[in-house]
Structure formats: C-alpha cells, structure tokens
Amino acid sequence: MSSSISSVLRKAPFLWVATGFIVLSSFYWLLGAADRFVSEARVTLSRADLSSGQSMDFASLLGGATGNTRADQLLLRDHLRSLDILQTLDTELQLRAHYSSHGDWLSRLWQTDAPLETFHRYFMRRVSIELDEFAGVLVIRAQAYTPEVAQAIAARLLAEGERHMNALGHELAQEQVRFLEVQVQELNERVKATRSALLAYQNRKGLVSPQATAENFAAIVARLEGQLAELQTRRTGLQSFLQPQATQLVEVNSQIAAVENQLARERARLAAPQGGTLNTAVEEFQRLQLDAEFAQQVLTTALTSLERGRVDAARTLKKVQVLQAPNLPEYPLQPRRLYNTAVYALAAMLLAGVLQLLLAIVRDHQD
C-alpha cells in the first residue's frame, strides 16, 4: 500500500500538492475567513447653477447633467482614494484599531502602528470607489468587520467628498472675487483722482464749463460780425451821395472802427497763436472730462464684474446627490466563500496540471 502511494506521488507530485492546497484553502474560506460587511452608496454630483442661462431640454434631463460633471466626479474619486481622506477617517473612526482587532489572521491589519503607506494599501483593499461611466454614478463600497463601522466609513466618505469639492470651488471663486475687489478699489481711487483734477482745473480757470463760455463768445463774435456787415453796407450806401467829411459818414466810420476793435478783442479771447485762450481751455477741459468719464465707465464695468463674480461664487457649490444612502448591512457579503473556494481550487488544479505536463515532457526527454 505504501509503495503504491509512493509510486503515485512520484508520478504526480504536483497534483497531490494541489490537492493539499485545495483542502487548506477550502478550510480557510469556508470556516476560517472572518465575515466582512459591505455598505454601499451611489452618488452623483450637480452644480448649483440655476442662472447659467442654459436651455433645458429632454436630452439634458436624461444625460447632460451627469456628463457635465464627469471631471468633478473623477476628482472626487481620486480624493476619496487619497491619504488625506484616510487620515481623516482614521482620526474620526479609529480604523487602525478596528481593522487590527477584528478579522482572521490573514485578513486583519497585522500592525496597529503600521506605516501609513501600508495602511493605505490595506484600506484600498477594503474600500472600492469606482465611476460607472455609462450611468455617470460614483459607486462607493466600504468593507468593515461590523455593520456600523462599514456604514460610518461610507457616510464619512460622502461628507468629506462634498466638503472637499465645495472647498475647491470656493477657493477659486474667492480668489477671483478678491482680485476684482482690488481692481474696484484701484479704479475707485482713479475716478476720484480724475474728478479732483477736473475740479481743480475749473477752479483755476474760474469756469464751470469752458466749452459753454467759448460758445457764448462765439455767439458774440457772430453778432459783431453781423453788425459790422450792416455798418459796412450802410457806409457804402452813404458814400454814394455824401462827401467824406459828412457827419453821417464820419459817424458810421467811427461805429465800424469800434465794432472792428471789439471783434478783434473777442476773437483774440477765443483763439490766438500764442495760446492761453478759450479754445486751449476747452481742449484741456474736454481731455480731463473724458478721462473722468472713461474712469467712471471702467469702474462701472468692474463693479458689474464683481457682483457677477460674487454670484458665480455662490453658484460654484457642488451638491453630492445621494441616489442610494450608505446602508446598514444585515448580512456579510464578503468574503465570497464558495466563489473563492472554487477559484482557488481551479487555479491550483490548472497550475498543477501545467507543472505535471512539464514534468512529463522532461521525463520523456530523459528516457
């Protein structure tokens, strides 16, 4: 009997090893493996963007909202897988103590003070965060050795994820608002400076509106030119029948000379080659007035942008819409005992068969 057994062992050693492995793995998966409870949550992201002006149609209701937030969902997934979120959960839920004090000797966290990287790898085997590309839904599954801890992990992941996404949006929006506030303050000082320059110029010249004053002088010049033309016409008529020494003709000549002198003085006040006249004052006044008006328009635009930025900052809120809340599991879904037993058995038999085939080939070549 012993010789036959040894003969079989010599002919198929790997099959016996595989059989032993199958027995041990079956014992572990069916009897020794500790139960793990799974809490599952399904969420999607939406923006508080009520005034974006986008048209709402049937296609957007079906898939547009989730498609627009795919990038945000990927960011949320990566954050929920990060070391930061693990440290936060460990502080609040004492995950190290839970995973190291529960479970069997193969599935538990062996060291309570294990390095953070080791703990993170272990945590990633207990938490699954995947994006359903077709439905646009983020699926979160948290495993723990008690139902309460599994539910608490999933719930805290949702809360921390929403807080983080809103913090990112608010940080960018607040930076934009702060930049606009600085610009508005600078532009406000610029408006004050241009208005002060305009007021100082009016006080220095003693004119509220040089342009209006120039228009008044232009009207006086036009009136004097009209009077001069009438007097010159009258003088021409008198010269046709009066002597140059005639009293009426002398009087008209005196009036013409007076009007010409007055007209020359008024024209000199309006414009002169050496400057310092009303037309120069009008040009300077208009330039200062345009500067003040332009600065006011820019300030108005900046104020509008600031208010729009504040509204946009309020609209950057991202709401984690819970399609399925983290459930309190009543039955342990992990480990999958029969499935794992079958997989390990098939893998062991397949590997043993391959090795046995290689051994047979080697023996044939030796013979």
Image (cartoon, helix red, strand yellow):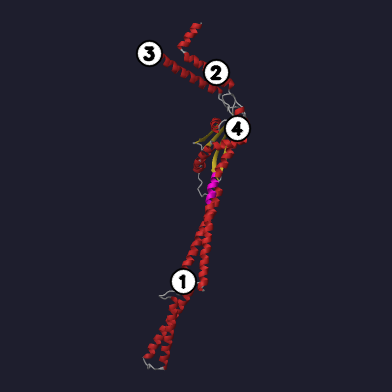
First of labels 2, 3 by sequence position: 2
Classify 104 as above or below 242. Answer: above
Distance from label 4 to label 3 (Cα)?
A: 57 Å
The answer to the question of whether label 4 and label 3 lie on touching residues, with beta carbons closer than 8 A, is: no
Image depth: mark 2 or mark 4 in front: 4
Q: Amino acid at mark 4?
A: Leu
Image depth: mark 2 or mark 3 in front: 3
Image depth: mark 1 or mark 4 in front: 4
**Picture quadrant of residue 140:** top right
- Label placed on residue 24: 2
Classify 60 as above or below 334. Answer: below
Query: Which residue is pictured at 54% across the width and 36% down the height?
Result: 83
Q: Secondary structure at mark 1?
A: helix
**Residue 252: image location, x then y, percent:** 42, 89
Which residue is labeled 3 in the image?
A: 365
Which span of residues is magenta-colored? Answer: 168-176
Query: Which residue is pictured at 58% across the width and 39% down the height?
Result: 160
First of labels 2, 4 by sequence position: 2
Does residue 366 appear in this view?
yes
Which residue is labeled 1 in the image?
A: 282
Which residue is labeled 4 in the image?
A: 95
Where's the C terminus, which quadrant? Answer: top left
The answer to the question of whether label 2 and label 4 lie on touching residues, with beta carbons closer than 8 A, is: no
Residue nearer the viewer, 274 or 166? 274
